[in-house]
Image: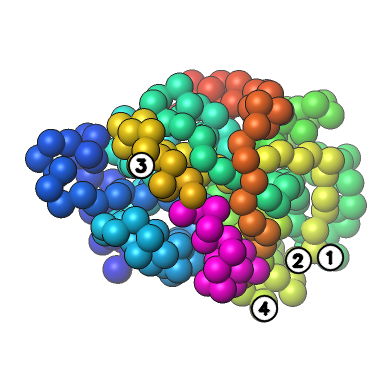
């Protein structure tokens, strides 16, 4: 009930810039986080980062998410958030909507399939005719997995069926109980799946690797403030709280967003735009 209420409130937030003249007095930083996990899990995981940024920057940091990836993407591109933690493909798209890339996580994001150990699924051909779950068609694990299947001759709807679930954890759980044959996810959310669920599935890796989640700032903050935020993030990685955060999440630390990252993500951004044409 609480989660539905929170999501309902978030889904109707006005899509307006956060740092308007009317809000300048209060100076609040609005941090938007892609809904790759449940709302409460996202808030709990990022609480150390929120508290650190508040203390370092000297003003409140409010954390927001959205009911789904499509809503979050629209809110991001409409400038609702001052700071974004988002999928790398969404991050590249945000660069054309007045956001500046600050950092990305060091860990490599690798889409994987999870299957039941006794399912008989051992490779690509075994996925033909199967029911595949995912958290959203717009998540980078979904985009990467669908592109990998397409590159190997398997077309969505013809050779396999996709089924969306609310979160990565829900997709994995559907495999564990036999509701679905496989699920697309990444190593990071798998670390956050309950151990009893994780024990019922095994990983089927694929040869796809992309840059991890990006953190971006809206240009309305101004160069000085953007540099303060960037430095705060880099310094967070060196604190005890930051080190614990990166151990718990498996993100490993921060790295710069490079032109090579943007180039590597171009095919995934293109496929995302194609899927958006068939969404809503």
Whether residue 241 is in magenta: the answer is yes
Whether residue 186 is in magenta: the answer is no
Residue 219, how many percent across, how many down?
A: 36, 31
Above or below, comparing residue 101 to residue 48 in the picture: above
- Asked if the residue at tag 1 contacts the one at tag 3, i.e. Cβ–Cβ closer than 8 Å, the answer is no
- Graded by Cα atoms within 10 Å as few (under 14), some (14 to 19) or many (20 or more), the crowding at tag 3 reads some
> Which one is in front in this view, the residue at disc 3 or the one at disc 1?
3
- Graded by Cα atoms within 10 Å as few (under 14), some (14 to 19) or many (20 or more), the crowding at tag 1 reads some
> Do we see residue 228 in this rendering?
yes
Query: Where does the magenta region start and end?
Result: 232-247
- Asked if the residue at tag 2 contacts the one at tag 1, i.e. Cβ–Cβ closer than 8 Å, the answer is yes
Q: Quadrant of the N terminus?
A: bottom left
Q: Secondary structure at mark 2?
A: loop
Query: Residue at the spot x=78%, y=39% of the render?
Result: 208
Q: Secondary structure at mark 3?
A: helix
Residue 196 has which mark? 4
Residue 175, how many percent across, how many down?
A: 68, 60
Query: Residue at the spot x=50%, y=53% of the render?
Result: 233
Question: Residues under labels 3 and 1: Cα distance?
Answer: 50 Å
Residue 201 has which mark? 2
């Amino acid at each position: 009930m609480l989660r539905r209420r929170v999501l309902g409130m978030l889904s109707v937030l006005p899509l307006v810039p956060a740092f308007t003249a009317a809000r300048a007095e209060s100076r609040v930083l609005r941090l938007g986080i892609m809904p790759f996990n449940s709302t409460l899990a996202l808030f709990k995981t990022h609480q150390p980062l929120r508290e650190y940024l508040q203390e370092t920057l000297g003003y409140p940091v409010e954390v927001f998410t959205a009911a789904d990836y499509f809503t979050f993407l629209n809110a991001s591109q409409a400038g609702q958030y001052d700071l974004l933690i988002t999928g790398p493909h969404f991050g590249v798209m945000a660069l054309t909507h007045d956001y500046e890339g600050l950092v990305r996580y060091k860990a490599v994001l690798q889409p994987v399939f999870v299957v039941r150990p006794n399912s008989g699924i051992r490779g690509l051909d075994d996925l033909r005719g199967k029911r595949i779950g995912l958290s959203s068609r717009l998540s980078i694990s979904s985009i990467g997995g669908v592109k990998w299947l397409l590159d190997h001759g398997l077309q969505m709807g013809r050779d396999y069926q996709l089924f969306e679930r609310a979160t990565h954890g829900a997709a994995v759980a559907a495999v564990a109980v036999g509701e679905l044959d496989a699920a697309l996810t990444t190593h990071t959310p798998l670390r956050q799946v309950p151990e009893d669920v994780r024990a019922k599935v095994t990983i089927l890796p694929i040869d796809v690797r992309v840059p991890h989640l990006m953190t971006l700032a809206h240009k309305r903050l101004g160069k000085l403030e953007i540099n303060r935020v960037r430095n705060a993030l880099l310094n967070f990685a060196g604190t005890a709280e930051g080190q614990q955060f990166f151990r718990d999440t498996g993100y490993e630390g921060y790295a710069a967003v490079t032109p090579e990252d943007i180039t590597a993500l171009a095919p995934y951004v293109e496929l995302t735009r194609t899927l958006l044409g068939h969404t809503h």
